Amino acid sequence: MLKIQNLHARVEDKPILKGVTLDVPAGEVHAIMGPNGAGKSTLSYVLTGRDGYEVTEGAATLNGEDLLALEPNERAAKGLFLSFQYPLEIPGVPALTFIRTALNAQRRARGEDEIAAPAFLKLAKEKAAALKIDFEMLKRGLNVGFSGGEKKRMEIFQMSMLSPKFLILDETDSGLDIDALKIVSEGVNALRSPERGMLVITHYQRLLDYIKPDKVHVLAAGRIVASGGPELALQLEAEGYDRIVGAAA
Ligand code: ADP
Ligand code: MG
Ligand code: MG
């Protein structure tokens, strides 16, 4: 599914990723943990094609397709979805409008017809009900005045509407209380499927109590320095990053 090989990238001439190699097969959830400044967010931005992140070496493919050759919107249309640490607020654009625009862009890129308004509303109502989202909230400006938990719930709603092929969650747990964390985790777990892969980036082990990863990788100073099963996350939590990162240095 997602294959990253010897990926090097820099931001404003500063090398950040220094040879990341990672393989996430379809159906698996991999966690990336690591200290602050390790390059975790940089990796998610490089994969989604954010401006200012320059790949200097290496490759990244999604289902065999060269991700790095595609424009950011084309990557999204191929089904790559990045959940932000700090979701955008867009005053004046209702969440429903925003999501319908994104969904139709995805469909056009796949050569499919745009979704008709009644079908869209029916789908949105079903998904909102499943996530216990008040439908009226979807008519307000996207995320404007929403609490942290509501923004996260809105993001899970977007994901379930867009049905991405590959999901990247970048520290989606930061700032969430335990109830919001459970909502997000349930939403994410509901999206687990044999065809879908996920990369869950987190600084803390706590999220992984709810979203059980198949594999855990430790990113430090732009490289993956350790990989293992879920027990690696527990070990990191108990021992701190210094020991594992230090041992690999
Ligand atoms: P993490 O998500 O693991 O905390 P980041 O990917 O955000 O790490 O950052 C990795 C490194 O890149 C840090 O040293 C950070 O200061 C640097 N960095 C990130 N974004 C920029 C930027 N826009 N300009 C300059 N340096 C940046
Ligand atoms: Mg950080
Ligand atoms: Mg980060």
Image: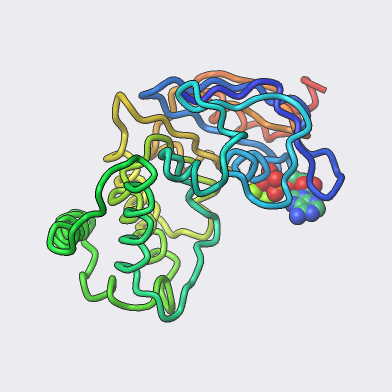
Q: How many marks?
A: 0
Q: Is residue 126 visible?
A: yes
Task: Name the residue: 31% across, 61% down.
Answer: 100
Answer whether residue 224 is visible to the viewer in this image. Answer: no
Vertical position of residue 26 compared to residue 124: above or below: above
The residue located at (64%, 39%) in the rendering is 43
Task: Please state, as top left, top right, bottom left or bottom right, where the N terminus lies in the image.
Answer: top left
Q: Is residue 161 left or right of residue 48?
A: left
Residue visible at 30% across and 45% down in the picture: 186
The quadrant of the image that shows the C terminus is top right
Q: In this view, does 48 lie above or below 153?
A: above
Q: On the picture, is 149 further left or further right than 54?
A: left
Say above or below: 3 vs 110.
above
Front residue of 112/237: it is: 112
Q: Find residue 162 and report its horizontal and vertical position in percent.
A: 32, 48
Q: Which residue is drawn at 32% across and 68% down?
A: 97
Q: In which quarter of the image is residue 110?
A: top left
- Residue 80, given in percent of the width and then of the height, sits at 46, 40
Relative to 211, 51 lies left or right:
right
- Residue 184 vertical placement versus 101 (above, below): above
Does 8 sit left or right of 80 as displayed? right
Q: Where is residue 81 in the image (x, y as percent from the top left)?
A: 45, 45
Asked whether 112 or 80 is in front, the reply is 112
- Toward the viewer: 103 or 183? 103
Residues 187 and 11: in front is: 11
Residue 158, horizontal then vertical, whole percent: 34, 55
Q: In which quarter of the image is residue 193?
A: top left
Q: Colour scheme of this structure image?
A: rainbow
